[in-house]
Every structure is written in structure tokens, then in C-alpha cells.
């Protein structure tokens, strides 16, 4: 988990660390403001408690160092970008981050700086009176929202790959909406109360004396400091953009020309992969695995300049061999043109640009369950078709709720069998859902067989194969008539495991990979390898006479 959270270079770690410090400060600051909704004493009481930390020498150094480091790294990242094309969430976070100093500088100058230099008592009341009822209160409210949204996006982008974060997101969304709403309600409530007091000449004088209100000359100096600080920010931002422009011009001079057959001709930076060049220039280029070399959908035929490219590496060579790629075929995500080339894209994503994102496929590691009814042909011999359909529907009505109750989905029905996938947050939860569903199916079948016996009908036996592995979920079929399904070796393994249960005379054959992912702590001594037809490697699996027998271990 530590590797996931803190991976990256020193700049990334500093940005995350400083961002966490600032996010914590903003969170408690906004909660502090929201207490104005209840009583002024609560508002000032929490502010005094916060100042014990933030106004302490050590706390101040940490806070303002985090602020300068975070802002500096943001400007540095702008200067080091290769292109301003980026995902919407990244672009939104960057724009919001650049908007923050425009109001934050004024806020810091009128509070901390005024307190330090002019001994102003910068309680919440002073800040609210200073803004009320001018447009400043709306600008500071906008600052509150910008800071909060910027921080929430950063936190989500940092933690989205962990196992536990997706589970908490539905609850955290409510918290993310509550915090700024609570703070704004506190501002409005306290603002109306204190402004009503300030309208009383007697109370007004007391407030001015209590806050040690700055003189007009002091305010003039504060405004001057604010203007100088804003000018410094604009200079720093301009310098970052200038570095970005200079680096881009330099890279243009060290660029390569790429011509797409049946497409445009572009000039791109050397060092980028052909897929990155396509994406940076808005050229449609299919890449289902996201450019990881795990599929061949980005492959191209290099018509000219192929002799200037390095030979395929191990990953690229293995992928090309798997699809028997012709001579001149290369993976766009693996080649980095250093000399002019002409490339033909074998799969054009713009030909189906009106399809949903799901049609492009999504790679996941999930549990797959393959189930089949035993002796169905002999059992239904001589029966009327309507009777067969009636039996099958009763059978599926009995067992399918056990699948859907664990978040599973029946991908397809195949006569007297089915294929189900458990699309949960991660591999572990998917594996556990698959095991629990297999157990519940066995229990449901026992109840259904008891009902059949009371009707004088023979019992039903089943076989199940359960496996965990990589597969692709996507829409398969002609545009407008595509059904969502799953594809991959995992499906084949689950099907072959189910077929083995016939020979073994057991109800379930579950792969060792799924057992380990699910945290199964039962007896693993019966696990043995199976050579399955159409599967290149032996698959260790555990035969289970009755799937319901797994219940005790899973519950533990």
C-alpha cells in the first residue's frame, strides 16, 4: 500500500505531502467558519484552538513552507509539460489551482500579515466585517469553493488506485458537499449577525477597538503589499509559461515528422511514442490497453522509415507474434520515432467514434463462474419443449439470485448453463463474491431439489468452474446492436474447470489463484494442477464435492 500511495519522484512526493498539509488546514478552517451557524463563541473558540498550532513558530513554518512548495511545484510542472492537452480532471485542477492565489494573497495579507505587522486582531468577526456586504464576501466564498474542489480532485487522483478508496467514495462525496455548504452557511449567518451589531454606533466603536482596526494609512500599505504579491505571482506564472514555450520551440527544432497513411502529417517531439504523438495531436488511434503493450490494437504498418527504428523489445515481439503480425507491423505504444516515418493504422478508432466508451473495452481482473446442469439431455428426452423451458426457468429462478446478491451479473445463458462475472471494486472482493455465490448456489440447489422430490421429479446436479484472471469487458457486435460481454483466457479456464467436474464427480472446481485472492483459509492440501484443453499452462485448482462445504472457511 505504501508503494501505491508514495510512488513517484521527489517532486511528486513533495507535492502530495504539501498538498495534504494544505488540505488539512483548509478542512479545519472551513469547519471553523461553519460553526458560525450555531454560536459566535464556538466560532472563536475553535479559531483560538487552531491558532495554537498554525500561529506557533513550527506550525507556521510547516504551513507556509507547504504553501510555497505546492505553488512552486505547480508552476514547475507547467514549465515542464510537453503539451497542454490533458484529461479534463487534470485541466480543471490546474485552472482552479491558478485561480487560488488571486484571492488567497489578499486574504493572507489582510489577516496574518496585518496581525503580525499592525497587531490587528484578525478574529473571524474582523474578517467578515472587512468583507461584508461588498463583493469581497462573494469572492472569498468563491475562493473557498475553488480551494475545496481543487483539494478534493487532488486527493481523489492520489488515492483512486488504492483498494479501499473506491468503497469510501460514495460516503466521501456527501462529506465533500457538506463541508463547503456548512462553511458558507456559517459565513452568512455570522455575517448578518455581526453586521447588525456593527450598524450600532456604540457597538461599532467597541468592535473597532477590540479588533485594533487598521488606519486608512495602514490599509493603504496592506493594499500595496497585496498588489506587490500579486505582481510576483503573475511574474512567476509568466516565467513558467515562458519556459514552457521555450522548451516547446527547442523541441520543435529537435522534432520528427510523422505521416499517417490515409491521415494527416504532423511534426512531433523526439522521444515520444507514436501513440503519444497521435494522442497529442488529436489523431484517432485505437489502444484498448491504454498503451501498455498488453494488446495489439494500436499496431501500425510502418511503410517508410522502419529501418530507422530499433528492433522490437521482448514485450512488443511477444505481442506481435501472438497475432501473427505481418512484416513491418509495430506497436505504436512501443516505438519512438527518431527519424521521419510513414505509418498505416491498422485499426481506426474514428470509424466507430459514435460508440460508447464501453465498446472500446476495459481490462479488469475479475472472478468468472461457469455453471452447467448435469445430464440435461437424458433428463429431458421425450419431454415437450414447453416443459423443458419451464424446468430451465424454474432452475435459473432458484440459483441466479445467489449470483446477483453478490454483485454478479449473468453474462450469457447457454441452454442449461450460464456464464457469470463478478464486477466489483477489486480482485479480492470479486474473488470473495464469486466464492460466496458458488456456496449460495449449492444451498439454493439443495432447496430446489427438495421441492422437486416432493413433486416426484429427479434431483438436479450441476458442475461449476470458478476462476480469477484478466479479462476484457466491452461491447461486441455491430454499432447500435452490440451487447456487453467478456472476453479472455479467464473465461476459457473457467469453462474447462467446469468440464473437469464431470470426470471428478464434484460440484465445484475452483482455481488456486481465486482461493488465494479471496483469502481462503481452508484445507489447501487437495489443490492439484489440471491440464486443461486449450490452456497453455497447468491450472492448480481445488475440487469441492459440494460447494456448500466451503461455507465454514469463507465465514471464518
Image: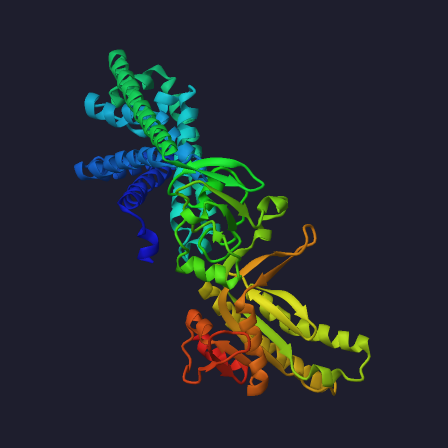
**Corner quadrant of residue 240:** top left
Q: Is residue 507 visible?
A: no
Q: Residue at (29%, 17%) from the top-left corner?
A: 223
Residue extending farthest top: 217
Q: Is residue 217 visible?
A: yes
Q: Residue at (49%, 59%) from the top-left corner?
A: 320
Does 217 sit above or below residue 304? above
Quarter that holds the C terminus? bottom left
Left or right of 383 on screen, residue 30? left
Left or right of 288 on screen, residue 227? left
Left or right of 283 on screen, residue 475? right
Does 249 sit above or below residue 349? above
Q: Position of residue 76 (x, y in %)?
A: 31, 34
Residue extending farthest left: 57
**Pick the front one: 252 or 445:** 252
Quarter that holds the N terminus? bottom left
Q: Position of residue 364 (x, y in %)?
A: 50, 60
Q: Residue at (56%, 50%) from the top-left corner?
A: 346
Q: Position of residue 42 (x, y in %)?
A: 33, 37
**Corner quadrant of residue 154:** top left
Does 332 sit above or below residue 377? above
Q: Residue at (27%, 13%) from the top-left corner?
A: 220
Amino acid at each position: 500500500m505504501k508503494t501505491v500511495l508514495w510512488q513517484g519522484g521527489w517532486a511528486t512526493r513533495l507535492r502530495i505531502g504539501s498538498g495534504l498539509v494544505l488540505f488539512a488546514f483548509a478542512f479545519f478552517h472551513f469547519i471553523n467558519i461553519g460553526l458560525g451557524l450555531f454560536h459566535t463563541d464556538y466560532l472563536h473558540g475553535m479559531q483560538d484552538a487552531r491558532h495554537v498550532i498554525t500561529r506557533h513558530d513550527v506550525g507556521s513554518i510547516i504551513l507556509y513552507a507547504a504553501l510555497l512548495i505546492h505553488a512552486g511545484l505547480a508552476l514547475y510542472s507547467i514549465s515542464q509539460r510537453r503539451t497542454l492537452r490533458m484529461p479534463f480532471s487534470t485541466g480543471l485542477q490546474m485552472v482552479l489551482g491558478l485561480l487560488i492565489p488571486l484571492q488567497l494573497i489578499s486574504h493572507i495579507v489582510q489577516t496574518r500579515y496585518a496581525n503580525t505587522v499592525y497587531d490587528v486582531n484578525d478574529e473571524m468577526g474582523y474578517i467578515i466585517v472587512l468583507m461584508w456586504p461588498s463583493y469581497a464576501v462573494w469572492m472569498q466564498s468563491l475562493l473557498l469553493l475553488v480551494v475545496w474542489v481543487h483539494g478534493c480532485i487532488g486527493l481523489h487522483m492520489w488515492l483512486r488506485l488504492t483498494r479501499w478508496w473506491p468503497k469510501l467514495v460514495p460516503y466521501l462525496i456527501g462529506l465533500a458537499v457538506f463541508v463547503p455548504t456548512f462553511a458558507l452557511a456559517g459565513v452568512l449567518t455570522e455575517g448578518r449577525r455581526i453586521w447588525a451589531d456593527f450598524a450600532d454606533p456604540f457597538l461599532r466603536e467597541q468592535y473597532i477597538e477590540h479588533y485594533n482596526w487598521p488606519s486608512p494609512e495602514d490599509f493603504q500599505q496592506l493594499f500595496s503589499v497585496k498588489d506587490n504579491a500579486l505582481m510576483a505571482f503573475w511574474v512567476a506564472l509568466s516565467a513558467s509559461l515562458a519556459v514552457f514555450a521555450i522548451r516547446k520551440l527547442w523541441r520543435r527544432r529537435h522534432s520528427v515528422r510523422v505521416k499517417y497513411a490515409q491521415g494527416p502529417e504532423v511534426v512531433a517531439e523526439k522521444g515520444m511514442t507514436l501513440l503519444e504523438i497521435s494522442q497529442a495531436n488529436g489523431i484517432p488511434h485505437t489502444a484498448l490497453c491504454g498503451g501498455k503493450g498488453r494488446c495489439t490494437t494500436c499496431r501500425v504498418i510502418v511503410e517508410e522509415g522502419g529501418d530507422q527504428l530499433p528492433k522490437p523489445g521482448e514485450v512488443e515481439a511477444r505481442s506481435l507474434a501472438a497475432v501473427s503480425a505481418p512484416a513491418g507491423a509495430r506497436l505504436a505504444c512501443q516505438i519512438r520515432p527518431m527519424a521521419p516515418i510513414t505509418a498505416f493504422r491498422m485499426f481506426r478508432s474514428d470509424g466507430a467514434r459514435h460508440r460508447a466508451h464501453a465498446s472500446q473495452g476495459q481490462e479488469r481482473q475479475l472472478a468468472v463462474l461457469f455453471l452447467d446442469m448435469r445430464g440435461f439431455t437424458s433428463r429431458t428426452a421425450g419431454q415437450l419443449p414447453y416443459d423443458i423451458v419451464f424446468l430451465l426457468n424454474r432452475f435459473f429462478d432458484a440459483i441466479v439470485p445467489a449470483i446477483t446478491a453478490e454483485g454478479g451479473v449473468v453474462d450469457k445463458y447457454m441452454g442449461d448453463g450460464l456464464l457469470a462475472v463478478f464486477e466489483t471494486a477489486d480482485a479480492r472482493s470479486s474473488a470473495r463474491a464469486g466464492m460466496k455465490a458458488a456456496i449460495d448456489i449449492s444451498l439454493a440447489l439443495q432447496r430446489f431439489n427438495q421441492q422437486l422430490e416432493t413433486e416426484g421429479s429427479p434431483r438436479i446436479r450441476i458442475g461449476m468452474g470458478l476462476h480469477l484472471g484478466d479479462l476484457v469487458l466491452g461491447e461486441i457486435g455491430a454499432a447500435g446492436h452490440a451487447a456487453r460481454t467478456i472476453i479472455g483466457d479467464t473465461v476459457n479456464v473457467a469453462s474447462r474447470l467446469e468440464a473437469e467436474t464431470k470426470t471428478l464427480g464434484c460440484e465445484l472446481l475452483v482455481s488456486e489463484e481465486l482461493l488465494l485472492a479471496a483469502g481462503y483459509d481452508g484445507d489447501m492440501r487437495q489443490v492439484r494442477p489440471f491440464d486443461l484443453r486449450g490452456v497453455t499452462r497447468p491450472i492448480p485448482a481445488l475440487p469441492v464435492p459440494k460447494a456448500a462445504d466451503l461455507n465454514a472457511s469463507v465465514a471464518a
